[in-house]
Structure formats: C-alpha cells, structure tokens
Amino acid sequence: MNYDVGQIANQFQISGDYLNAVPYGTGHINDTFLITCNEADCEIRYVFQRINHSIFKDPPRVMENIVRATSHIQHKLKSSDVSDTSRRVLTVVPTINGMSYHQDPEANYWRCLLFIEGTLAFDVLETPEQAHKAAKAFGQFQCYLADLPEPALTETIPDFHNTPKRLQTFLQVLDKDPCDRACDAADEIGFVLKHASMCDVLIELFNNGQIPERVTHNDTKINNVLFDKKTQEGICVIDLDTVMPGLSLYDFGDMVRTATCQAAEDERDLSRIEMDIQFFEQLARGYTSETAGFLTDAEKEHLAFAGKLITFEQMIRFLTDHLSGDIYYKIHRPGHNLDRTRTQMKLVQSIMDQEDEMNKLTENILNTLA
Ligand code: ADP
Ligand code: GN1
Ligand code: MG
C-alpha cells in the first residue's frame, strides 16, 4: 500500500525539512519507513511506523506502554554514568499536538522514533560474540524494567505466548482446513501433534508459582537489537510493541530461536538449519551475566527448554497462518509460511538433539556465576 509519508511526517515535531521516505527493515508486522530531513545542510533521520492495527487492536495503549517503558529506561540511564543515553533507548518523537501517535484520515496509526545512527541490525548473526552482546542487551532490558512502577503494562496482544492456546487455535484451523492446504503439510502437522505435550510446561510452572511474571519484551528476535557499528556492542533494544507482562523465558527462548541458527528463518535449504551450540553458549553467558541475580531456580533450569518451546510455538504459529491462508505474517512468495514452518521444525529437532548438552552448559555457566 502507498502512504503519503511526507504528509504524515508534517504531523510530528521533526527537525528540518522533509526530504524523502524509503521502506525499511524486514519486520513481518508493521510498515516501517526511514525518513530523511534536511536541517542547515545536515541530514536528520527518523523511523516512521504504521502500527498494524489488525494485530495490535488498541494502538494508543501500545504507545502508552512504549512511552512508559522508554521513559523509565531513559530516567535510569540519565542517573547512571553511561554516555550516549539517547542511543541506548528508543525516543518517541511527539506529534505537533504532543501525542505519541498520529491517526491519519484512513484511521491508520503512525509513530515516529529517532533513528539511532551508527548501528546495524542482523537477521542472522555472524559470530558467537554477537550472540553474547545481544543477549546482554536483552537481559539488561529486563533488568531496567524490573522496577517499573504500577500499574501493570497493558497486554497488547492477549495470550501472545500462551503456547497451549496457540496449539488450540492450530487444532481448530486444522480441523476446518479452510484453504485445503493440510495435505501439503502432513509431516509438519504430524510433528506438532507428536510433540504437543511440551506446550503446557512453562504455563504450569507459572501457575505453580515457580516462575514469576515480569515485564518482558516478548519479541526478542535478533533483529530487534541494534549493534553499535564501532564498538559492536548491543546498544539498543527496539520493536517495543509487545513489551508487557510475560515470562523471562519467553525472551530467552526467542533469542535461542533466532540467534543460534546460521540461516534465515525462511531458508529453503534445510541442511543449513541447525542450533549452533557455540552461539547458544555465548547467548546463555550474555543473558545470565545480567539476570542471574534475579532469576529463580526454575527459570535457570529451563533456559534450554525455553529455546525449544518458543521455536515450537513459532512453528505452530507459522503453520497455523499457512493453513489459514496467510492472514497474519507478511509473505513474499507462495508457501512462504510453510517454508518458515519447516525451518522452525528442523530447528526444534536440532535443539532436541542437543538439549542435554545445552542443559549441562547452562548449569556450568550458572555455577561459575554463583
Ligand atoms: P517490525 O515490528 O516490523 O519488526 P521494527 O521496529 O523491528 O519493526 O523495525 C524494523 C527494522 O527497522 C529493525 O530491524 C531495524 O533495522 C530498523 N529500526 C527500527 N527502529 C529503529 C531505530 N530507532 N533506529 C535505527 N533503526 C531502527
Ligand atoms: C513477528 O514484527 P517482527 O517481525 O519483529 C512477530 C513475532 C514473531 C516473528 C517471527 C507482533 O515479529 O512474534 O516471533 O514475527 N510479532 C508479532 O519472525 O506477532
Ligand atoms: Mg522487528
């Protein structure tokens, strides 16, 4: 769809004159644009995003969450001795009316963020050290938000990581098979049915009080952390639409899913899909270096399991969308969600094959920290 982003940019308190807008990033949900403005012959850049309101049903509440979380982190950074605070947390640029979003005449919701210069985002990591740095950034993000004052953040997508509900929805769609696609996905459907019992594990630990609810990011896909080009540090956690109450293990699990595999989420050559234990080790080291002080025993014991569960959950989500006719995730070719399903299935299998080793690793790492 075409949008007059220049017109929308005029609604925000941006500096300089609007020059141009280009589509940006590889996200599956929102529409992201990079805007360039000119002020006294200097380029100033912003990120504009159209919030996908068929997925986020209440964009004003999404923005309220984001403003609360980013203001809290900004406040913490300012009272610490770190430099560069405006590059370490997103800054929401207000509209000319002082709002955090603008609603256009077609009822689309738009937001504007400062573009964080001198950074890179990766869909696939290049080195285990990057996994360490990304996990440290996500761990630190959880720490910063651990004392966010009441009231609780709004649940922007209810039951987002409720894996048993994701399974239920899958079974309902499978039953109807509305696009007659189940016949192409027999192996994948069989895999979900065979391993379905893992879906209940974290929710049961939560219900038993062994795992607490925390403020979590819930979408810790690896391209949601920006790396500083000079220092290589994981400098800023972005894509904050799903920051809300959740389990810390959802965040660690999604890091395992996206940071330990050396191929893209939609890779068709499945021989390239494997959980790389070196990346996993660095991920666990980076994450626990920030969070070991507050994680409960049950959280620590389920780090590897969370990687398996969240990858399985993602497999279920992609497969459900394939069977439903591709209504949730953006697709760029026919069968795209089925390709994505297959990479996730292969990755779950690879995690299962290495789960004992992963558990030994996390235990050793935590022992050395204790
Ligand atoms: P989506 O929800 O579609 O994944 P994101 O908020 O993750 O959208 O943005 C998409 C991409 O745009 C990111 O992966 C990153 O490359 C880039 N990006 C987003 N926000 C910023 C920012 N403030 N500064 C620099 N790059 C950004
Ligand atoms: C979506 O927006 P993006 O691309 O960062 C999705 C995540 C999935 C991910 C799979 C709100 O994330 O939950 O894990 O795709 N976001 C939402 O790539 O559903
Ligand atoms: Mg993103």
Image (cartoon, helix red, strand yellow):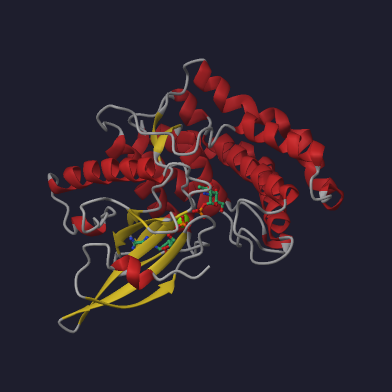
Q: In the displayed structure, does residue 257 sit left or right of residue 182? A: left
Observer-nearest of 44 and 218: 44
Quadrant of res 120: bottom left
Residue at 39% of width from left, 29% of height from top?
A: 295
**Image quadrant in which you'd find residue 264:** bottom right
Residue 318 seen in the figure: yes
Front residue (pair 351, 78): 78
Residue projecting furthest to the front: 105
Who's the residue at 36% across and 36% down the image?
Answer: 291
- Asked if residue 239 lies left or right of residue 199, the reply is left
Q: Look at the image and tell me whether residue 230 can be seen.
A: no
The image shows residue 315, relative to residue 229, as above or below, that is above
Counting from the top left corner in percent of width and height, residue 92 is at 27, 54
Res. 90 image quadrant? bottom left
State left or right for residue 304 relative to residue 58: right
Image-based side of 1 in relation to 102, left or right? right
Quadrant for the C terminus, please: top left
How far from the left and from the top, in percent, is residue 253? Answer: 53, 41
Residue 265 location (% of width, % of height): 61, 58
Quadrant containing ligand 1? bottom left
